[in-house]
Image: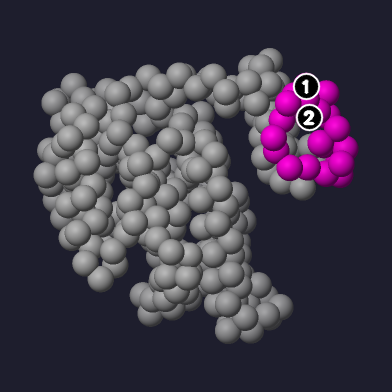
Amino acid sequence: MVIVIAGPTGTGKTRLSLFLAKHLNGEIINADSTQVYKNLDIATAKVKNMEGIPHHLIDITNITKDYTVFDYQKDARKCLADILSRGKTPIIVGGTGLYIKAALYDYEFSNKEHNTYEGLSNDELYKKLLEVDPDTSIHLNNRRRVISALNYYEANKVPYSKKEKNDKLLYDTIFIGLTVDRDILYYKINKRVDEMFNEGLLNEARGLYESGIRTKAVMTPIGYKELFAYFDKEISLEEAKELMKKNSRHYAKRQYTWFNNQMKLKWFNVNYENFYETEEAVLNYIKSSL
C-alpha cells in the first residue's frame, strides 16, 4: 500500500507525513520538484527535523543540473520498490502533482531534450497544440502547460488529453488531500514568508545570487527570483516580500485547481488549532481503508 499526502503549500503536509510514518511503519518520499535540489533549503520549506524517519529524494542533485519528471519517475519507482520490499509503507508527500502522477501511474516520459519553442507566440503555440490535440483543455495563455503537452506528444505520439483520460494506477494507493478555508490558508502563507526571512532566507538567496547560477532549479522556487530583483535594485525588500506572498497565494490556487482536476483525493479540513485532530482523522480513514 502506498499513501499520498497532497494539497497546496502551507497546509501541513510535512507534519502529517511524520505522524503517519510513525504510526504506519512508513518512509517518506519527497514529491516537491524544488526539494530535490541541494542548497535550496529555506525558500523550498525543506523539513528541518526528520524525527528519525527515513526521507527519500531530498537533496539528490545539484542546482546546475536539470532534474526532469523523467528522472523523478525513475528514482521514485526505485524508492517505492525498495520500501515495499522491506515491508514498510511508502508515503509520498508534496505539492508537485505531476511528480506524484509520474511515480504512480502508467505514464511514459522521454529523457530526450525538450523543445522550448522560443520565438513562438502563445497563439502560435496553441495552434500547434490544437493540430495534434484538438480535445485539449489547456488554456492558450498557460504557456508552460501548452509546451509540456506539445513535448509529450512529440515523445509519445499520443495527445496529452488522451493520456489524462487513460490513467492507469500501478500501485494500491490511498490519496489524502489537505485543505483549509482560503482566507486562513492565505494568512498562513503570508506568515510563513515572514518566518522564512527570520530563518535566514535573505542570506540564502544572496549566496545564490552571487554565485551567478540562473538555472531552472534556482529560478523556479518562489523566493529567489523575487529577491534577485531586490538585489538588482529593481524593487525594494518590502516589495520583494509582498511579491513572494502574492506568488505563493497564486501558486496555492493553481495547486487546488490541478489536484481537483487530476486526482481523486480524500480531502480533510486542517484544524490548525488542534492539528492532532486532523492527524487522527486521516489515520482512522487510512486504517479503515486497509
Q: Which mark is residue 132?
A: 1
> Which residue lies under the disc numbered 2?
129
62 shown above or below 152? below
User: Measuring 13% from the left and 46% from the top, which residue is drawn there?
Assistant: 22
Q: Secondary structure at mark 2?
A: helix
User: Measuring 17% from the left and 43% from the top, which residue is drawn there?
Assistant: 284
- Residue 18 lies, in percent from the top left, at 21, 51
Q: Which residues are magenta?
A: 120-140
Q: Secondary structure at mark 1?
A: helix
**Which image quadrant for residue 26?**
top left
Is mark 1 in CB contact (under 8 Å) with mark 2?
Answer: yes
**Which image quadrant for residue 246?**
bottom right
Q: Nearer the viewer, residue 268 or 8?
A: 268
User: Measuring 14% from the left and 25% from the top, which residue is drawn there?
Assistant: 86
Amino acid, disc 2 = Leu
User: Measuring 68% from the left and 43% from the top, which residue is drawn there?
Assistant: 144
Amino acid, disc 1 = Val
